[in-house]
Image (tube, rainbow, N blue to C red):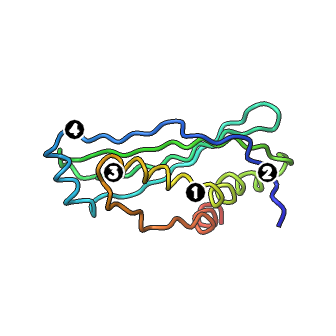
Amino acid sequence: MEKNYEIVLEFVKDISSETKNAETFIYVKENLKRYNLNIDINSLALKNQLIEVNTKLTFDDKSENENKSFFFINYATIIKINNMDDRKAVEKIILCDLQNEIYPRVEKAFLDVLKVSGFKELEIETKIDFEKLYKEKFN
């Protein structure tokens, strides 16, 4: 199947691993199961049929506990879409097709930072089904 878009540029726009002290670090390592992965995707139209797509992953603990870390990445992708007239097709490219292509790189960059931050055993077990998410949102 031919792609209706081209990736022009991709880069880590923002990345963060915040752990306030050693006590927090030890607590978080023992309680990683409390952490959830959240994803947010937004886009911004640029000139010349270009779109900036920001794929943001947050891995955090929503509890009220003070001993917690915060992990975040904003992965920016600049894409060129050949036909921007079909709004539904553009939405599918941004939310599904592009995500399926870039997500392995986003996840690897995110996990690399977490591992360097001391969380070497951390793996993201939940694989995101972008096709399913897209269909749930728009059908």
Give the mark nearest the N terminus, 2 or 3. Answer: 2
Q: Tell me if mark 1 has few (under 14), some (14-19) or many (20+) residues whose alpha carbon lies within 10 angstroms of its own.
A: some
Reply above or below: 71 against 100: above
Residues under labels 4 and 1: Cα distance? 29 Å
Tell me the kind of residue under disc 2: Tyr
**Are the residues at dot 4 and dot 2 in contact (C-beta closer than 8 Å)?**
no
Q: Is residue 129 left or right of residue 60?
A: right
Q: Which mark is residue 60?
A: 3
User: SS for tag 3?
Assistant: strand
The residue indicated by pointer 1 is 103
4 or 1: tag closer to the N-terminus: 4
Tell me the quadrant of the picture where the C terminus can be found: bottom right
Q: Earlier in the sequence, mark 3 or mark 1?
A: 3
Which residue lies at the image location 54% right of the left edge and 52% below the top edge?
Answer: 106
The answer to which of marks 4 and 2 sits earlier in the sequence is: 2
In the image, what residue type sits under mark 4?
Answer: Lys
The Cα atoms of the two marked residues, 3 and 1, are separated by: 19 Å
Q: Kindly identify which residue carries mark 2.
A: 5
Q: Which residue is mark 4?
A: 20
N-terminal of the pair, mark 4 or mark 3, is 4
CA gap, disc 4 to disc 2? 42 Å
- Mark 1 residue element: helix
Q: Amino acid at mark 3?
A: Asp
> Residue at 50% across / 46% down in the picture?
56
- Horizontal arrangement in the rendering, residue 88 relative to residue 19 (left or right): right
> Image check: 102 left or right of 22?
right
Question: Which percent across, then down, holds residue 67?
Answer: 18, 46
Q: Residues within 10 Å of mark 4 (few under 14, many from 20)?
A: few
